[in-house]
Image (cartoon, grey):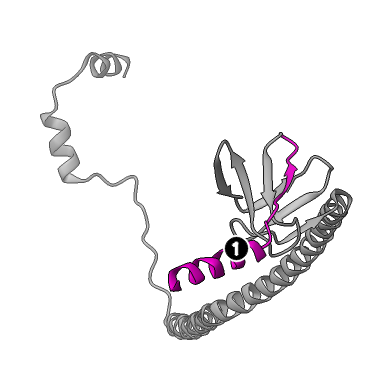
Amino acid sequence: MKAQSVLNKILTELAQIRKVEFAQMALENGTILEAEEFAPENEVFIISGEERIPAPVGEHKLEDGKILVIIEEGIIAEIKEEAAVEEVEMQSEEAVAVAEEVASEVADEAAEAITEEVSAAIEVAVAEALVPVVEQVAEEMKKMREEMAAYKAEMSAIEKKFSSQSAAKAIKHAPGTKNETNVKLASKRVPTAMDRVLAKLK
């Protein structure tokens, strides 16, 4: 009797459990989806023959033009209208265009600021690099002026020294006098044809 009463209880419970009916929807490409209810946080499956496969993550366009959004595999996140998606996409494109424009302006301003800073830094670096060179050149010029002043003083002293001395005797040329060496060399020389002609003319 006990077994029969337990069986009756089980049958009663089973009779009370309502039969779950699944709703079906088709995607734009004809794939059939099945869910207890097409609402957020409900499970959704792809029907493939006798198999039920959890729907993959992504946005899936339904036959009626709505978009089924699945963030977690097999779980409906939301169902939204296509127009809303297009509007969001347009707003996103506009936002991207504005962001690119602002980024371009900021980049131009940054480039100008960097150019000014670099120019200023180059000027400072050049000035710092030239200071020692200019100082060195100035020192060299000072030394040269001192050396020139010393040279002028020395030349002035030499000039005074020579101007105070009496002039040396001038050397006179005596063309009429014969040098003995020249005479000896001339006598040893063999007379040429010109010498013979000149001797005959004399």
Q: What stretch is highlighted in magenta?
A: 1-29
**Viewer-proximal residue, 185 or 93?**
93
Q: Would residue 200 be found to the left or right of residue 17 on screen?
A: left
Residue 20 is a magenta residue: yes
Residue to which mark 1 is pinned? 14
Callout 1 secondary element: helix
- In the image, residue 158 sits, relative to residue 56, either above or below, namely below
- In the image, residue 27 sits, relative to residue 199, either above or below, namely below
Coordinates of residue 22 in the picture (x, y in percent):
70, 51
Type of the residue with mark 1: Leu
**Viewer-proximal residue, 111 or 40?**
40
- In the image, residue 24 sits, relative to residue 127, either above or below, namely above
Please give the count of numbered marks on the rendered protein.
1
Q: What's the residue at 70%, 56% (across, down)?
A: 36
**Viewer-proximal residue, 89 or 64?**
64
Q: How crowded is mark 1: few (under 14 residues within 10 Å), some or many (20 or more)?
A: few
Q: Would residue 62 be found to the left or right of residue 138 on screen?
A: right
Identify the image quadrant of residue 18.
Answer: bottom right
**Viewer-proximal residue, 8 or 21?**
8
Residue 131 is a magenta residue: no
Position of the C terminus, as image quadrant, is: top left
Coordinates of residue 43 in the picture (x, y in percent):
64, 58
Q: Which residue lies furthest to the front in this view?
A: 1
Q: What's the residue at 54%, 77% (across, down)?
A: 129
Identify the image quadrant of residue 104.
Answer: bottom right
Identify the image quadrant of residue 17.
Answer: bottom right
Coordinates of residue 185 in the picture (x, y in percent):
14, 36
Coordinates of residue 107 in the picture (x, y in percent):
74, 64
- In the image, residue 110 sits, relative to residue 134, either above or below, namely above
Q: What's the residue at 51%, 82% (across, down)?
A: 132
